[in-house]
Image: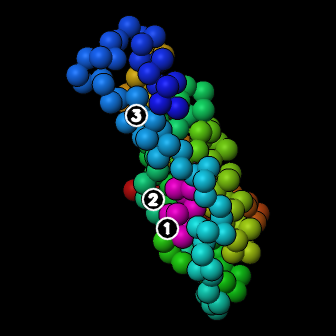
């Protein structure tokens, strides 16, 4: 990867012997590896048995989870927040694990629409919840730094599973509770 970054830097017309760039291919490779660390994680390691029996049957919401991801089309970041809700069905997930699931999928190259669905389906699969709702709000550098160059646009995507899809009242409660 380091060699590839050296080629890219040279291809844009820069001099790799310039003092500020001497170690840049190595640093860029290390950064890129970190930004895509989700490929080296799996759900069992992330959840780490943090599922707990519970009689709770009301909505659990984790709101404003920071998101950093990478657009698969331009390899530019998109940054935002994720809101996750689920209705427990005998089991609750450790609080930090919700954010870790967001990070695992966020740290992969993809589009926001797929990311939203992956988070929802995984939480559904792990918890056996009666329903899961996920909303992702993000600003995309591919739209801000190049192309149309719109600085204030925010993309919002949602995935509603189980009772969040089938029950309008459940969906409405979630949407009301995540409003700023």
Neighbour tally class for label 1: few under 14, some 14-19, many 20 plus, Cα within 10 Å: some
Q: What numbered label is drawn on residue 26?
A: 3
Residue 132: image quadrant is: bottom right
* Residue range of the region highlighted in magenta in the rendering: 97-106
Give me the residue at 38% from left, 7% from top.
13
The residue that mark 1 highlights is 62
Q: Position of residue 171 (x, y in %)?
A: 64, 62
Q: Report, in whole angstroms, how far the alpha carbon at label 3 lies from the one at label 2.
A: 30 Å
Apparent side of residue 52 relative to residue 129 in the rendered image (left or right): left
Q: Can residue 53 be seen in the rendering of this structure? A: yes
Q: Earlier in the sequence, mark 1 or mark 3?
A: 3
* Label located before the other in sequence (3 or 2): 3
Res 122 quadrant in image? bottom right
| Mark 3 Cα-neighbour bin, 10 Å: few <14, some 14–19, many ≥20 | some
Residue 126 inside the magenta-drawn segment:
no
| Image coords of residue 108 (percent x, y) | 58, 44
Q: Which mark is residue 82?
A: none
| Residue 69 vertical placement versus 26 (above, below) | below
Residue nearer the viewer, 166 or 3: 3
C-beta proximity under 8 Å, tags 3 and 2: no
The reply to whether callout 2 and callout 1 are in contact (CB within 8 Å) is yes
- Residue 84 seen in the current view: no
Above or below, 89 relative to 42 = below
The image quadrant where one finds the C terminus is bottom left
In this figure, which residue is indicated by the disc labeled 2?
65
């Amino acid at each position: 990867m380091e060699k590839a970054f050296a080629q890219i830097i040279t291809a844009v017309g820069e001099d790799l012997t310039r003092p500020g760039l001497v170690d840049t291919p190595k640093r860029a490779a290390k950064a890129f590896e970190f930004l895509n660390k989700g490929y080296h994680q799996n759900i069992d390691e992330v959840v780490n048995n943090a599922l707990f029996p519970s009689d709770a049957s009301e909505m659990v919401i984790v709101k404003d989870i920071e998101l950093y991801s990478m657009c698969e089309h331009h390899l530019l970041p998109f940054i935002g927040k994720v809101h996750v809700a689920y209705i427990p069905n005998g089991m609750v997930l450790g609080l930090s694990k919700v954010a870790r699931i967001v990070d695992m999928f966020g740290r992969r190259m993809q589009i926001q629409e797929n990311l939203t669905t992956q988070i929802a389906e995984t939480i559904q699969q792990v918890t056996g919840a009666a329903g899961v709702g996920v909303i992702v709000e993000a600003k995309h550098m591919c739209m801000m730094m190049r192309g149309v160059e719109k600085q204030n646009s925010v993309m919002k995507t949602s995935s509603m599973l189980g009772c969040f899809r089938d029950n309008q009242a459940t969906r409405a409660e979630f949407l009301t509770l995540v409003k700023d």
